[in-house]
Amino acid sequence: MLRRLARRNSPHASPAPHARWESRHGGRNELVARSGADPFRQERRLRWRDHFSLSENVLFLPHMHAEHDGLRVAQLSDVHVGQATSSIRIRRAVEAVNSESPDLVFLTGDYVTHSPKPLPRVRELLSGLKGPVFVVLGNHDHWVDGPYLRESFEQLGYTVLQNEHRVVHVKGAPVTVLGIDDGRTGRDDVETTFRGAPESGTRLVLTHAPPTVEKLPAHAGLVQFSGHTHGGQFVVRGLTEAIFRRVGQPYISGHYHVNGNQLYVNRGLGFGFGGPYLRRGSEPEVAFFTLRRETVVATAS
């Protein structure tokens, strides 16, 4: 179960010093906040191409370790370093993640697009993320140079998972991070990824392409973090959904329940405004998650 907290869609996308919780009928809350100063560009010099939004989400995972109630996760996806994505936007996104001090940081693929020229800049622009950082690769990464990107992230101290899992201790209990390789290029191997992994507790799945969720063990209490779709990129209600379904991508943006597990599809940071690719109705996103074991009916102001 997910409770979506619509969070400060301000042009700054920077940490908010003050916020208040408001209860909403139907189990949905909204976080209203005032944004602080942009650390990378003076307000009068902000450009539309540098903008993105921060989303706050609460995921309810009743089978996770009790010690992980309140665990914080940040997700960046589809950065697409190059002319299609403002470098300032990327660095501001890294700063936004660090300012929240999440317990885990997930990067879910497509760090480049078609050209190998931006490859060295990936490590430069995505460096400095704090906390345990886990990485999976996307289809564009494999098309350009997957081994180079894996090595680049490992040089930063990040953990790259290609049909692998790792157990990391957070808040006194183990978290199993299962990184499945890209399904768009046919590299996703769920069986290999899960082989030898714990069968209970806090288990979080990373993979680039959302449809891989259909290959997960059913009703296993898993949550999968993905990207790939850019939230539809250019959204025309009804038409975009129909096109995505036709090409085998029924999961476009946000939260889904699939075969007794959960899926979150990040809208991605790249291919935004001011580049050669049109984007409409799907703002670039940095996503934050708070994991809860039980539904919280009321929240304090």
Image (cartoon, grey):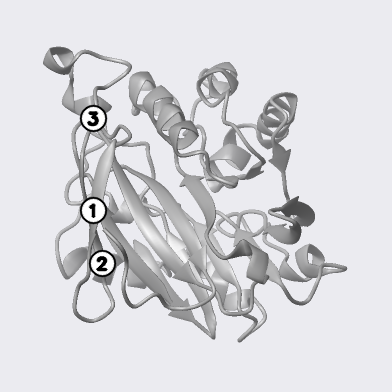
Count of marks overlaid on the render? 3
Eye-nearest disc, 2 or 3: 2
| 102 relative to 273, above or below | below
List the residue tagged with mark 1. 20
The amino acid marked with disc number 2 is Asn
Residue depicted at x 26% and y 67%: 29
Residue sitting nearer the eye, 60 or 20? 20
Q: Is residue 258 visible?
A: yes
Mark 2 or mark 3, which has the lower sequence index?
3
The amino acid marked with disc number 3 is His
List the residue tagged with mark 3. 12
Mark 1 or mark 3, which has the lower sequence index?
3
| Left or right of 55 in this view: 95 | right
Quadrant of res 57: bottom left
| Left or right of 192 in this view: 44 | left
Place of residue 161 in the rendered image (x, y in percent of width and height, measured from the top left): 72, 48
| Most distant residue in the left direction | 44
Place of residue 199 in the rendered image (x, y in percent of width and height, measured from the top left): 78, 76
| 26 relative to 145, above or below | below
| Left or right of 241 in this view: 246 | right
Place of residue 88 in the rendered image (x, y in percent of width and height, measured from the top left): 35, 20
Cβ atoms under marks 2 and 1 closer than 8 Å: no
List the residue tagged with mark 2. 29
Q: Secondary structure at mark 1?
A: strand
Measured Cα–Cα span from mark 1 to mark 3:
19 Å
Q: Is residue 80 visible?
A: no
Mark 2 or mark 1, which has the lower sequence index?
1
Q: Secondary structure at mark 3?
A: loop
Crowding at dot 1, Cα within 10 Å, few <14 / some 14-19 / many 20+, comes out as few
Quadrant of res 82: top left
Quadrant position of the C terminus in the picture:
bottom left
Residue depicted at x 30% and y 63%: 300
